[in-house]
Image: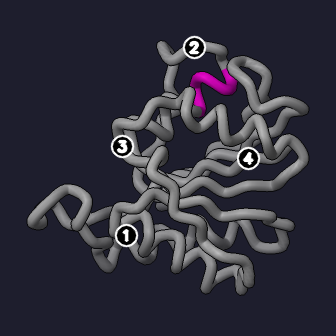
Amino acid sequence: MRLWLLRHGQAEPHAATDAARELTAHGRQEVRQAAKQLAGRPLTAILVSPYVRAQQTAELVRSELGFNGPLTTVPWLTPDSDPREVLKYLDERESAEVLLVTHQPLVGALGGLLVHGHRQEPLPMRTASLAELEGDIPAAGLMELLALIHPR
């Protein structure tokens, strides 16, 4: 399995709710840079948090890549979701190439869990950071971090 973890781009600091925060112009540019790293990859699915900034990030990625598949919104990719919920889903997609568009602290904790086997060493995911992981089984400590790319 190849798993891509993408944190949303920079978002406005305030909105009516955290879930309603939108990407800034800089955030959109960050996402476009990150999407270039995915060019030519045979993505089988893009899964995205229901939060506005993550939805906007996923739409930009889809547009930049010309990805024809659907964006699948899932409730277990929000900032405070439990990484174990994500692992339950990934366990069913062992041979896939999946992009998850999500938030901190979940994305860092999930990456750390998959690579190190625990959550005490999260991946340092800034806005629009993209992590590429690979492994036979998407389980704690069994995936290798191939790349961690931060936008400029």
Image check: 94 left or right of 37? right
Mark pair 4, 3: CA separation: 18 Å
Q: Decide: marks 4, 2 in contact (CB < 8 A)?
A: no
The residue located at (49%, 40%) in the rendering is: 107
The residue located at (70%, 80%) in the rendering is: 65
Quadrant in the rendering for residue 111: top right
Element type at marker 4?
A: strand
The type of colouring in the image is one colour
Q: Decide: marks 1, 4 in contact (CB < 8 A)?
A: no
> How many marks do you count on the picture?
4
Magenta stretch secondary structure, dominant: helix
Amino acid at pointer 3: Pro
Q: Which residue is mark 2?
A: 118
Mark pair 1, 4: CA separation: 22 Å
Q: Which residue is mark 4?
A: 3
Quadrant in the rendering for residue 93: top right
Measuring from the top left, give residue 6's x and y in whole percent: 55, 54
In the depicted structure, whether residue 147 falls above or below residue 56: above
Mark pair 4, 2: CA separation: 18 Å
Element type at marker 3?
A: loop
Amino acid at pointer 4: Leu
Q: Which residue is mark 1?
A: 27
Q: Which mark is residue 126?
A: none
Q: Which residue is mark 3?
A: 79
Tell us which disc is closer to us: 1 or 4: 4
